[in-house]
Image (tube, rainbow, N blue to C red):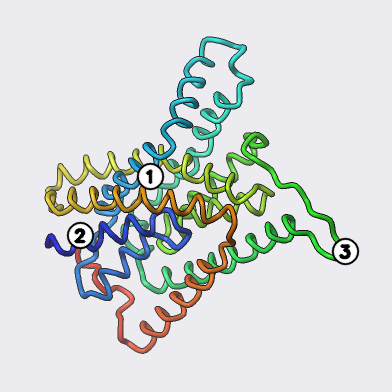
Amino acid sequence: MSWFESFILGLVQGLTEFLPISSSAHLRLTAAFAGWEDPGAAFTAITQIGTETAVLIYFRKDIARIVSAWFRSLTDKTMRSDHDAQMGWLVIVGSIPIGLLGVTLKDQIEGPFRDLRITATTLIVMGVVLGIADRLAARDEIGGRHRAMRERKTLRDLGVKDGLIYGVCQAMALIPGVSRSGATISGGLFMGYTREAAARYSFLLAIPAVLASGVFELKDAGESGHISWGPTVFATIIAFAVGYAVIAWFMKFITTKSFMPFVVYRILLGILLIVLVSMGVLSPHAGESAG
């Protein structure tokens, strides 16, 4: 991998990780369109450490409060009803599905799931799902001629059941094209949460899974030696800087705007990809030699 490739891929990772358009799909497509080798699941997991570091810094006050309350709740029973302590447990509970499926489906994630036809399909299907979820949220927020406005849930309403559902939604992002944030935000909107609450929990929930995946891939990559460390570290730094800016913008954007621009983009990109593969312009396995 060249330094130019690592710069572009780090930029793509930072731009797409927190938007509901799938960073793994865009890394895959960038390599395919440019004629580069597939950067592979290990590169994706390691560069995600950069974007998750951006989450840790952006939400540092929330995270510090949650971690502190959670640890105190282990010995102080009165703390177990504290919202922050409960959030700590809910992040753990919500991380179980992706942990189990990530280990079980590791070979599929690094192989068959990276087929461009699967990526195109998930881009379209999850785009439609996100559009429906967003429409339901908008209907509750603005009401209508024959229906009143309906108050949506915040993170203080989050319980174990909803936490597990969020976790299952996050696990779907193991398939390129689904999008971790897109799946969890869609799940949150369907369960009646506000856009801001769904996005905030989505980002917090991703921290254990992404960091664990990155460390796991670091170990494997170190043993195999099949990774260009210099360019990968450079891409991770780029992903961190760009990712932080995207989080700040996205959290402001969703307070007043809908997800429809992302829905349209996903569907159009998926259709374009299907057309290109069908016409033979792109192979469904383009750039997979390094995957």
99 to 256, vertically: above or below: above
Which residue appears at 41% of the width and 68% of the height? 119
Q: Is residue 291 left or right of residue 123?
A: left
Q: How packed is label 1: few (under 14 Cα within 10 Å), some, or many (20 or more)?
A: few
- Inspect the image, locate mark 1, and give the three-letter code of the amino acid beneath it: Val
The residue depicted at 40 percent of the width and 47 percent of the height is 102
Foreground of the two, 193 or 166:
193
The correct choice, above or below, for 119 with respect to 210 in the image is: below
Q: What amino acid type is highlighted by mark number 3? A: His
Pointers 1 and 2 in contact (CB under 8 A)?
Answer: no
Identify the mark nearer the N-term, 1 or 2. Answer: 2
Mark 3 and mark 2: Cα distance apart in space: 52 Å
Q: Residues within 10 Å of mark 3 (few under 14, many from 20)?
A: few
Which image quarter holds the C terminus?
Answer: bottom left
Can you give x and y, in whole percent of width and height, for residue 214 in the image? 30, 43
Q: Which mark is residue 146?
A: 3
**Which is nearer the N-term, disc 1 or disc 3?**
1
* 194 relative to 75, above or below: below
- Toward which corner of the image does residue 16 lie, by quadrant? bottom left
Lower position in the chain sequence, tag 3 or tag 2: 2
Residue 258 left/right relative to 282: right
Reading the image, the residue beneath label 2 is: 7
Circle number at residue 176 = none
Residue 13 horizontal side relative to residue 80, left or right: left
Is the N terminus in the top left, top right, bottom left or bottom right quadrant? Answer: bottom left
Q: Which residue is mark 1?
A: 103
Neighbour tally class for label 2: few under 14, some 14-19, many 20 plus, Cα within 10 Å:
some
